Image (cartoon, rainbow, N blue to C red):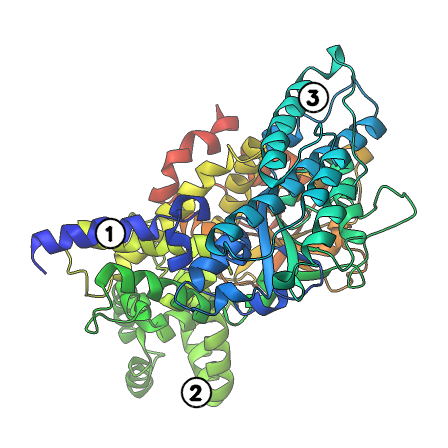
């Protein structure tokens, strides 16, 4: 490519791969849509909750289920518009709107009735807008009767709208007036309210009798359900529980975002799987995320390179380093050379043993040296054991070689550990397509900025630095994500430092520690609640991942789970991204890692027989002041 072509490629690539959020892509979202494996489950009439963190594709899936999305996806099919198997109507829970329905001015019961009426207005408007859209493309289709619109007008207190056009106009005005009233509810009389779900049932029962929609399922696609207050979730849960044959709900929600399972009837619960199907995106994509991510990226690359048949597959852009190659790049040869010289002068080490040792790879020799130190043996003793039972040694080598990569460049400048390869990138993303796109975007843009050919593979150094930058970016963004954002950032900085120091000092210790679980001792109920809420926020905002513990009995008990920093942050801190081993932390440890970081980090590391005085990796030095906070 010449320079002009490279610049054109860079701009187009950045436009498509930087669009991590569905909202940023506009109409392009449907052109780039890749159907996930669980998509067919959403097209059934059963209510569904789609659970996943930020960036797992919930919004994209819901918008692709919408009638606008389906129309765009099937635009070239002349038969699609004649029969709709389902009609999805997308609705995003807007925090600014729903938070207006709260305050001390009214009782929760009154707020519930007001909010239920607001939902009637919103959902009725969604249905009418679909019908208006449909009639534009199908002017000869059977229409709803004016009599129906008169009934609908009465149901919603719209002052006798006479037909569809009149009801749509009056509905919009009514909603605006209602919102204005809610904002001044303390100074206003309560407006007349509709029965929860009544207008929706009235309208959709009539729509379902139209010949073009007799066999059509209608879905309300509710995005960001976690933005609802508890009482608002109970209102919505009631609609979901009793939606019946006329319509159904497809709901996106973050893990732990469903804070209420009861309805307006306190003795009635939303029960899985009787009332809804739960689709956990991580579970659904587990083991298949690499293939799904490849398809997503391939579609974008086709758009960038206009389906150039000569371009490599996305996996080829990100070659992986073998453990031996990585050890070589990290400089293990210099360490081994020095050790071999010492052994050649050791009379107890026979010449033929020395020659046989040299047949081992440099990483294998380094691992042998580390295991000898860990087992308090000489290198000769450890080598003799390895010779005697080579299969046992190979097993030990395979178990430890990855963890010892972290110690080769301990306390040195530059890259101390590489994070390279498509498989590694998909593991860092942990079933989160947004994180995967960020990694790819950062790596290839850095690749182009370094003057490399867009069709050539990305170097291990650029891949690693891109992963570090992506982790740092998401760490900084945590602060603005929630009320607990600053605390979450401090918690990650502290635990990340603990795991980083432990990773670089693996000799004589349990390898690849990157998880924690909570001790059973409760210092105080108040502290326990604060820690519970902080961990809940961490999970909802993908600062942390949680995994069921071996004795899991109750989903809400935080002590029955193991926790890990999301692997997207592993390259920034410099510890293993693979789910491995854990340490125990107390409520007090967790809270003090936020409030008193340096002293608490030092104490935890001391319990693990490590030193806090390890030098910070270069990418972490931006936070040197944070780690020195208590040392002043």
The numbered dot on residue 387 is 2
Tell me, yes or no, whether the two marked residues, 2 and 3, touch with CB atoms within 8 Å: no
**Image quarter for residue 88?**
bottom right
Query: Looking at the picture, does residue 366 appear above or below residue 390?
Result: above
Comes first in the chain, label 1 or label 2: 1
Q: Position of residue 274 (x, y in %)?
A: 81, 63
Is residue 576 among the parts visible in the rendering? no
Residue located at (78% from left, 17% from top)? 105
Q: Nearer the viewer, residue 376 or 511?
A: 511
Q: Residue at x 57, y 49 (%)?
A: 131
Asked if the residues shown at circle 3 and circle 1 are in contact, with their CB atoms under 8 angstroms apart, the answer is no
**Circle 3 is placed at which residue position?**
182
Q: Nearer the viewer, mark 2 or mark 3?
A: 3
Question: Residue 117: which numbered mark, if any?
Answer: none
CA gap between label 2 and label 3 equals 80 Å
The mark total stands at 3
* Earlier-in-chain disc, 2 versus 3: 3
Return the residue at label 1: 12
> Which percent across, then down, holds residue 473?
40, 41
Q: Residues within 10 Å of mark 2 (few under 14, many from 20)?
A: some
Q: CA distance from mark 1 to mark 2?
A: 57 Å
Placement of 171 over or under 274, stated as above or below: above
Of residues 102 and 463, the one nearer the viewer is 102
Mark 3 Cα shell of 10 Å, populated few (<14), some (14-19), many (≥20): many
Question: Looking at the image, do the residues carrying marks 1 and 2 touch, with CB atoms under 8 Å apart?
Answer: no
Q: Residues within 10 Å of mark 1 (few under 14, many from 20)?
A: some
């Amino acid at each position: 490519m010449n320079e002009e072509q490279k610049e054109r490629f860079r701009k187009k690539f950045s436009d498509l791969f930087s669009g991590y959020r569905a909202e940023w892509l506009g109409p392009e979202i449907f052109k780039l849509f890749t159907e996930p494996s669980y998509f067919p489950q959403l097209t059934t009439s059963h209510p569904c909750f789609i659970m996943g963190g930020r960036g797992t594709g919930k919004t994209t899936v819901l918008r692709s289920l919408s009638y606008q999305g389906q129309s765009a996806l099937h635009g070239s099919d002349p038969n699609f518009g004649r029969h709709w198997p389902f009609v999805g109507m997308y609705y995003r829970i807007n925090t600014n709107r729903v938070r207006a329905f709260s305050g001390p001015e009214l009782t929760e019961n009154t707020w519930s009735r007001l909010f239920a009426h607001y939902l009637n207005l919103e959902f009725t408007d969604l249905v009418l807008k679909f019908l208006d859209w449909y009639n534009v493309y199908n002017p000869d289709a059977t229409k709803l009767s004016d009599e129906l619109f008169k009934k609908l007008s009465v149901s919603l207190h719209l002052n006798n709208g006479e037909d569809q056009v009149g009801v749509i106009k009056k509905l919009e005005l009514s909603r605006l007036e209602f919102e204005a009233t809610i904002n001044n509810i303390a100074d206003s009389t309560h407006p007349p309210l509709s029965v929860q779900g009544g207008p929706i049932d009235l309208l959709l029962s009539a729509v379902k009798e139209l010949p073009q929609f007799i066999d059509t399922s209608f879905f309300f696609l509710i995005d960001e359900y976690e933005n609802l207050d508890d009482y608002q979730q109970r209102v919505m849960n009631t609609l979901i529980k009793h939606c019946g044959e006329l319509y159904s709900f497809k709901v996106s929600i973050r893990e732990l975002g469903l804070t209420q399972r009861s309805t307006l009837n306190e003795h009635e619960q939303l029960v899985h799987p009787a009332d809804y199907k739960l689709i956990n995106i991580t579970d659904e994509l587990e083991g298949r995320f690499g293939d799904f991510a490849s398809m997503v990226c391939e579609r974008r690359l086709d758009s960038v390179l206009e389906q150039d048949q000569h371009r490599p597959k996305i996996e080829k852009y990100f070659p992986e380093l073998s453990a031996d190659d990585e050890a070589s790049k990290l400089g293990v040869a210099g360490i081994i050379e020095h050790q071999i010289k010492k052994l050649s002068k050791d009379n107890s080490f026979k010449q033929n043993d020395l020659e046989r040792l040299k047949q081992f790879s440099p990483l294998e020799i380094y691992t042998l040296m580390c295991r000898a130190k860990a087992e308090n043996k000489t290198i000769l003793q450890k080598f003799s054991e390895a010779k005697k039972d080579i299969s046992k040694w190979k097993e030990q080598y395979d178990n430890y070689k990855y963890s010892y990569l972290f110690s080769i460049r301990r306390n040195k400048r530059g890259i101390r550990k590489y994070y390279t390869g498509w498989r590694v990138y998909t593991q860092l993303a942990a079933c989160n397509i947004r994180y995967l796109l960020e990694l790819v975007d950062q790596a290839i843009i850095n690749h182009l900025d370094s003057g490399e050919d867009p069709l050539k593979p990305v170097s291990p150094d650029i891949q690693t630095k891109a992963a570090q930058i992506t982790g740092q970016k998401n760490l900084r963004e945590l602060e603005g994500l929630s009320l607990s954002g600053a605390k979450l950032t401090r918690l990650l900085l502290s635990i990340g430092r603990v795991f980083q120091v432990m990773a670089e000092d693996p000799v004589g210790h349990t390898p690849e520690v990157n998880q924690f679980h909570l001790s059973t001792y409760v210092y105080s109920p108040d502290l326990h609640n604060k820690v519970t809420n902080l961990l809940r926020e961490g999970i909802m905002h993908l600062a942390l991942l949680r995994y069921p513990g071996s004795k899991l009995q109750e989903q809400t008990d935080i002590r029955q789970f193991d926790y890990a920093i999301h692997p997207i942050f592993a390259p920034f801190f410099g510890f293993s991204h693979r789910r491995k081993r854990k340490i125990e932390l107390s409520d007090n440890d967790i809270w003090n890692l936020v409030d008193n970081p340096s002293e608490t980090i030092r104490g935890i590391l001391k319990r693990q027989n490590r030193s806090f005085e390890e030098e910070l990796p270069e990418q972490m030095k931006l936070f040197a002041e944070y780690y020195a906070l208590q040392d002043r």
